[in-house]
Image: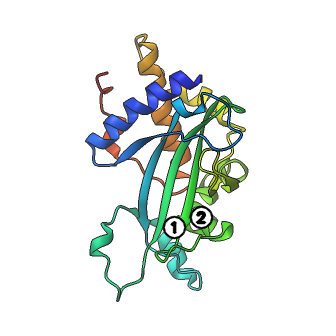
Amino acid sequence: MKYEEFQSAAMAFMAEANDHGQEWKWVPNHPRPLQNVGADDRGYLALEEVYREPLEIDSTENRNELDDEDSCTFIDPSVIKSETAQPNMYRYHVVYVEAYQCPVLFLQGKSIDGRLLDTEYIWRDCCGSMNHEQSWLTDSCLPTPEEHPVTGEPFHFVHPCRSKDFMDAIMQAFLPSVQEPCTQSNLRYFKLWLSVYGQAVGLRLPLALHSSNPHPT
């Protein structure tokens, strides 16, 4: 996927997702030292402040219950009560990485007081249920630490090494009965890709996105 195709699909996806109550935003790249000239006219897709209840590491019973439930919910920070367990906050960014020539999913987890969550905690918190149910995710979708390619912040990312082969198979399985415009095909690819790789790290897209028509451009 070329950058221009990514940007077009990301913008269309953002419009649809926002219509269904999930507030993604397009963030222009702000040049950092040593970045190539022209990098500032690009951008990435961001979903901020995704809250999920904290992982109860010490209880096997509670751990199993957590794996069986969709624990990723959107919570208004203003209604979080201090006497209850404080949720963790996740950020999800979709960044086009030239080295891979495809979008890459980055995430960052923090406790409510701003402390970064470590890698093993994120694995257990976001990836536990998916990776024991779907073996193909075990080695390809466990997020690993990586500096954010635009902001330089400490993030984790889902390595795209197997994305092409997997997405080729998925796209073939969901091939429409009639030929579709390139822009619609790119949007369909983007939604399928983010649905699969997002759920591997605790990101749930609105179900309505899978049945909605492409947003007019």
Q: Residues within 10 Å of mark 1 (few under 14, many from 20)?
A: some
Q: Is residue 26 above or below residue 144?
A: above
Q: Position of residue 118 (x, y in %)?
A: 65, 70
Residue located 35% across and 47% down the image: 206
Secondary structure under badge 1?
helix
Residue located 34% across and 45% down the image: 207
Q: Position of residue 140 (x, y in %)?
A: 70, 47
Q: Farthest residue to the bottom: give it.
A: 83
Q: Is residue 71 visible?
A: no
Give amino acid for label 1. Answer: Asp
Please name whichever residue, 28 or 68, is drawn nearer the observer in this view of the structure.
28
Instruction: Name the quadrant containing residue 123.
Output: bottom right
Q: Is residue 124 visible?
A: yes
Location of mark 1 (residue): 67
Location of mark 2 (residue): 128
Give amino acid for label 2. Answer: Gly
**Quadrant in the picture for the C terminus:** top left
Q: Tag 1 or tag 2, which sits nearer the N-term?
A: 1
Secondary structure under badge 2?
helix
Q: Position of residue 99 (x, y in %)?
A: 72, 32
